[in-house]
């Protein structure tokens, strides 16, 4: 394995992986569990909307209650999802719809009302409409914004409000977001609004009419398209990411802004919450994943592994772990949390309960690791670990860290070090030269510590060499850019174009009222040298076309690319009978 990694290059680097290994074991692509259009022909994705996937469990008696919905071009499919248990049967979709004049762009199931006989599925469209359908009964019950009087722009995100059977939220590329009630009509005239609340770069209006009608509320957020939003696990807060590069987090019921964050460059495209609601990860056109603390309202880390825009980020609720310093003190059980309302699919309750206990007893030393993943337009899947040395930089580590040299390029987990371009000098924004800045050892925690970290944490802090290393962490990305061909970078928007003195470029490329040159170096957008830079546990090319879906389920990881192929990756030990039955026919995967 190490030999293959050492020899890696050329053809090896561009080979699509069908399995990869992390510390918990090997993840394997189940080729017989691939979902797509029935003809299995790659979809010509030029100019079409991203392929999206939604899941729901209908709790039927057969024990096979998972259902999957996905859109490809003008088509929408609804299947029984058999996951790691059985091969997919694409000849028998439960429901299939082909739309004319508009394309589905996103969708969401109502998990509260789903039964074996009926599910409520919202579908957003490229022309601005939202449809409520029941793919089990094959009914179309309602169409919202039918005449496009509310908004004419593309629907970018649609979600049921957590805990509600009738309220849903819709975001558009106009930058507006609307709250609907399925019971109300949209009216025959364009709505009139009156201001309810406004703040910095956002405003919320109510609909002014004699009788209650949709939309109940209109949110105008930031500049440019509102690309995605995500509700917190408790349903009380809403994270929005926009084309102006801002993450804005609102108290949803109070309609108040809780906090903001600015991307390093360009628009933000995706966001997700940690299982305990303490952290938000955002990704976008700066090729980075950015970790933001909900409690402190600040960036605590960035991760660089992608070579193009990051399209989806998601936390893995099942691999996120908490280790108590004294096991005897842990007395909670899964049952304590059974009475809570489950938003979305069932989560790893033990993880959530342990995280909750950690938050209520912050004084007790605890070892916590959050696992999250990201996929991008570079066709790569990255997995990341957010560890306690990043979360609690000023506390002593709860377990010993081994030191390793930055130049270690072994093929094991977490060895994809960002600073691999061994240039002889690193020039910072002041024009100073930091020679031999790669010689200092760094703690191996899938992160590059920064010069401002707590002095007791690392052997390389508070000295000029450490400062050189952290500056070089940013600048080495230029060298990365030089070593890759333009083919590797599909959209020509990457960290390679950015240096610490490129605020003039930032100013030209972001159309926003906020001057990026003024936000860079502030708490809104710290410099690259001011926060730890995470490195991915794994970073693997897994598709031919850009990736648009990443969902963590209990037995597997689900990804999808713009060609319309939805792939199931069995977790370690979860392959089951499916692989052994078809082993002779399965392509041998590349293990790296």
Image (cartoon, grey):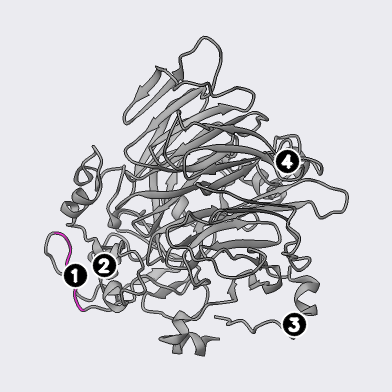
Q: Which residue is mark 1?
A: 434
Q: Does the magenta portion include 162?
A: no
Q: CA distance from mark 3 to mark 1?
A: 54 Å
Q: Which mark is residue 119?
A: 4
Q: Write the residue at 77% across / 73% down.
A: 578
Residue furthest right in the image: 61
Residue 309 pos. (x, y %):
39, 59
Query: Could one spot residue 324 in this view of the protein?
Result: no
Q: Which residue is mark 3?
A: 583
For residue 442, which quarter of the picture? bottom left
Q: CA distance from mark 2 to mark 3?
A: 46 Å
Magenta highlight range: 424-429
Location of residue 48 with respect to 5 vertically, above or below: above
Q: Which residue is mark 2?
A: 472
Location of residue 292 with respect to 93 vertically, above or below: above
For residue 226, which quarter of the picture? top left
Question: Of label 2 and label 1, which has the lower sequence position?
Answer: 1
């Amino acid at each position: 394995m190490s030999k293959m990694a050492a020899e890696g290059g050329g053809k090896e680097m561009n080979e699509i992986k069908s399995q990869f290994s992390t510390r918990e074991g090997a993840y394997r692509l189940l080729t017989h569990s691939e979902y797509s259009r029935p003809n299995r022909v790659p979809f010509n994705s030029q100019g079409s909307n991203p392929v999206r996937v939604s899941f729901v469990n209908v709790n039927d008696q057969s024990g096979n209650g998972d259902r999957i919905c996905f859109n490809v071009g003008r088509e929408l499919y609804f299947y029984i999802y058999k996951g790691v248990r059985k091969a997919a049967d694409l000849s028998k979709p439960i429901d299939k719809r082909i739309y004319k004049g508009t394309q589905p762009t996103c969708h969401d199931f109502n998990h509260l009302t789903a039964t074996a006989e009926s599910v409520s599925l919202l579908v957003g469209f490229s022309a601005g409409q939202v449809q409520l359908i029941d793919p089990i009964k094959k009914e179309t019950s309602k169409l919202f914004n039918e005449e496009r009087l509310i908004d004419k722009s593309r629907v970018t995100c649609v979600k049921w409000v957590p805990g509600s059977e009738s309220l849903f939220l819709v975001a558009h590329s106009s930058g507006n977001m609307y709250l609907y009630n399925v019971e109300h009509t949209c009216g025959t005239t364009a709505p009139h609004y009156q201001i309810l609340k406004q703040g910095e770069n956002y405003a919320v209006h109510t609909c002014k009419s004699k009788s209650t009608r949709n939309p109940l509320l209109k949110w105008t957020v930031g500049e440019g398209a509102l690309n995605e939003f995500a509700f917190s696990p408790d349903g009380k807060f809403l994270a929005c990411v926009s084309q102006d590069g801002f993450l804005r987090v609102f108290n949803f019921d109070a309609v108040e802004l809780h906090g903001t964050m600015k991307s390093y460059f360009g628009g933000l495209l995706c966001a997700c919450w940690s299982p305990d609601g303490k952290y938000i990860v955002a990704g976008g056109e700066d090729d980075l994943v950015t970790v933001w603390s909900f409690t402190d309202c600040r960036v605590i880390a960035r991760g660089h592994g992608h070579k193009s825009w990051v399209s989806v980020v998601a936390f893995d609720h099942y691999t996120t772990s908490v280790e108590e310093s004294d096991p005897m003190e842990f007395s909670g059980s899964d049952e304590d949390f059974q009475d809570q309302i489950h938003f979305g699919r069932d989560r790893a309750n033990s993880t959530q309960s342990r995280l909750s206990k950690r938050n209520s007893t912050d004084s007790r030393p605890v070892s916590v690791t959050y696992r999250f993943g990201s996929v991008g337009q570079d066709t790569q899947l990255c997995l990341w670990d957010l560890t306690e040395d990043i979360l609690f930089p000023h506390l002593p580590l709860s377990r010993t860290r081994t030191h390793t040299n930055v130049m270690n390029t072994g093929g094991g987990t977490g060895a994809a070090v960002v600073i691999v371009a061994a240039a002889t000098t690193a020039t910072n924004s002041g024009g100073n030269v930091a020679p031999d800045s790669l010689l200092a050892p760094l703690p191996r925690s899938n992160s590059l510590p920064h010069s401002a970290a707590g002095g007791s944490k690392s052997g390389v802090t508070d000295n000029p060499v450490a400062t050189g290393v952290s500056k070089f962490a940013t600048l080495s990305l230029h060298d990365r850019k030089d070593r890759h061909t333009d083919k590797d970078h599909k959209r020509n928007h990457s960290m390679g174009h950015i240096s610490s003195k490129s605020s003039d470029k930032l100013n030209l490329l972001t159309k926003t009222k906020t001057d990026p040159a003024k936000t860079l170096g502030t708490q809104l957008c710290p410099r690259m040298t001011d926060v730890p830079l995470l490195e991915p546990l794994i970073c693997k090319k897994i598709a031919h076309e850009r990736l648009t879906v990443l969902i963590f389920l209990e037995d597997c990881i689900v990804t999808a690319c713009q060609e319309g192929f939805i792939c199931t990756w069995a977790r370690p030990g979860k392959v089951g009978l499916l692989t052994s039955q078809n082993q002779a026919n399965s392509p041998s995967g590349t293990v790296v």
